[in-house]
Image: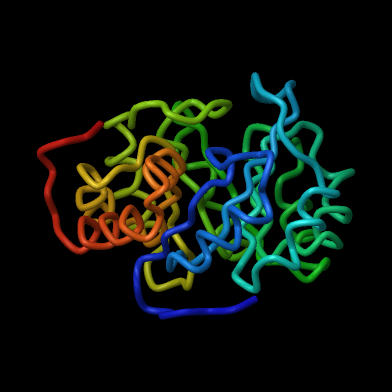
Amino acid sequence: MTARDTNRIKIAPSILSADFARLGEEVRAIDAAGCDWIHVDVMDGHFVPNLTIGPAVVKALRPHSALTFDVHLMIDPVDPYLEAFAAAGSDIITVHAEAGRHVDRTLQRVRELGCKAGLSLNPATPESVVEYLLDRLDLILVMSVNPGFGGQSFIPSQLEKLRRLKAMIGDRPIVLEVDGGVVPGNAGAIVAAGATALVAGSAVFRNGTYAANIAALRVAAAGTDTATLS
């Protein structure tokens, strides 16, 4: 795992929007373009209405970048697969609050496997679900679209959820990440609400201008423009 500037807002391109025919090349390209993390969306066609990749693909991609692999498991059940994704080279494993009955146990297991533990909340899930889990968490991921597909528009109500989560986190070293509809037009508002990491798929991979697209997100994240939320 390689860290760039530990103080800046993390830009984590989602490879869901990459060219799956050349994923290794795509991972190398976004690394060279200056992203901070590689966001890997894992979908099972059950918990969410799409089917993507498994631990074998994560393992195959691992040699292509030393950056943090931010692996988002949109699967149910999740516990039987934690060990495989950790062994494949995940640095962060994020599970969904809605996908497990014993989330505290799941988060403990993620850390036992040597990974950082993240918890994701769907748009309709209240922030209160993290209240008794804060000391188990390294990351909270706010879904600002309904999970399952890329290219959706940001749901504005999630800004208030971010503000509340930021207050709940306090001075704990927990990354507050946002995934869904993140573009330069809303990145400033998202960061102003408390986000410290931005997942972006279409906004990074469009037009093939990865470095310029990542730079545009960084510039926008440094501002507080709330005029555009889609």
Question: In the picture, which quadrant includes the C terminus?
Answer: top left
Residue displayed at 58% across by 39% down: 16
Q: Is residue 87 above or below residue 203?
A: below
**Percent x, y for residue 144?**
40, 35
* Viewer-proximal residue among 47 and 90: 90
> Where the N terminus falls, by quadrant?
bottom right
Residue 142, percent from left and from top = 45, 43
In percent of width and height, residue 61 lies at 74, 57
Q: Is residue 49 above or below residue 134?
A: above
From the viewer's side, name the closer residue of 156 and 227.
Answer: 227
Q: Residue at x 43, y 57 (%)?
A: 176
Horizontally, residue 120 falls left or right of residue 20, namely: left
Tell me: 110 left or right of 200. right
Q: Quadrant of residue 183?
A: top left
Viewer-nearest residue: 151 or 177 = 151
3 above or below 80? below
Q: Quadrant of residue 102?
A: top right
Q: How many marks?
A: 0
What kind of colouring is applied to the model shown? rainbow
Residue at x 45%, y 49% (from the top left corner): 199
Q: Is residue 15 left or right of residue 197?
A: right
Figure quadrant of residue 79:
top right
Give the image location of residue 39, x and y in percent: 57, 52
